[in-house]
Image (spheres, rainbow, N blue to C red):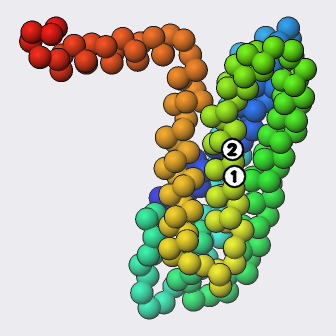
Amino acid sequence: MAQMFFFMTCAGSECTLLAVMAYDRYAAICEPLHYSQFMSREMRVSLAVASWISGLLNSAIHTTLGTDLVFCGENQIHHIFCDVPPLLKIACSDTYVNEMALHTATVFVGLSPFLLVVISYVYIISTILKIRSSTGRRKTFSTCAAHLITVIVYFGMAILNYNRPSAGYSLGVDTLVSTLYCIITPMLNPLIYSLRNKEVKGALQKLLSIQDKEDAPPGKQ
């Protein structure tokens, strides 16, 4: 249960953080003159704390409900990690309450942040289309591309994973879905958080050039 608690805490917090990042891009692109007011230090701290609290509350509910389940026979979860759908699959007791909690969490923890992301990007795209320069439009949209891809992969796979009844559970499909939003999404995070930063890009290029020199033959260094 401890593994499931920490996993769902991180998964739930990620949903809110992606919505916060969409709001950050909305403020930067649509309200650049007021960005410092919309995303002040106090606001950033408050949004980060709220994201983690929402993840903790969501995880605590599912973990508490999971402790009331009864298991019989083989108690081994056939999955890459402990998650709610595979846990419900091996339970012998009634899982109706747990499934309803999953569907409810899909609305509040998954769908609501996703709708906030959609609304933010409606305004962002509308603002981008008003830019006269095609280069300016392309450069502005490129700052959102990695985040947009992550949102589609993460929310799409998470909603698909947690919004299915246990009767429709498939280990192969669930493993693929879980891999997409648990492994692919973190791999895209550096593109969102760091690689758009000029200083980080400069340091990375410097590191790669040093590595190329070390790997080059002695006569070509």
Q: Is residue 24 visible?
A: no
Of residues 68 and 132, the one nearer the viewer is 132
Of residues 100 and 201, the one nearer the viewer is 201
Q: Is residue 37 above or below residue 191?
A: above
Which residue appears farthest toward the left when viewing the image? 218
The quadrant in which the C terminus is found is: top left
Q: Are marks 1 and 2 in contact (CB under 8 Å)?
A: yes
**In the rendered image, which residue does mark 2 sit on?**
151
Q: Residue at x 82, y 35 (%)?
A: 121
Would you call the spot at circle 1 few (<14 residues within 10 Å), some (14-19), or many (20 or more)? many
User: On the image, which quarter does residue 29 sit in?
Assistant: top right
Type of the residue with mark 1? Phe
Q: Residue at x 54, y 11 (%)?
A: 198
Q: Residue 197 bears which disc, if any?
A: none
Q: Is residue 75 above or below residue 100?
A: below
Instruction: Report the side of 123 relative to 85 (left or right).
Output: right
Of residues 34 and 209, the one nearer the viewer is 209
How far across and how far down the image is residue 128, in percent?
A: 84, 23
State the CA–CA distance, disc 1 to disc 2: 6 Å
**In the rendered image, which residue does mark 1 sit on?**
155
How far across and how far down the image is residue 192, in percent?
A: 60, 30
Type of the residue with mark 2? Val
Q: Is residue 21 visible?
A: yes
How far across and how far down the image is residue 131, in percent?
A: 86, 17
Instruction: Report the side of 74 relative to 29 (left or right).
Output: left
User: On the image, which quarter does residue 159 sit in?
Assistant: bottom right
For label 2, the SS is: helix
Q: Residue at x 49, y 50 (%)?
A: 183
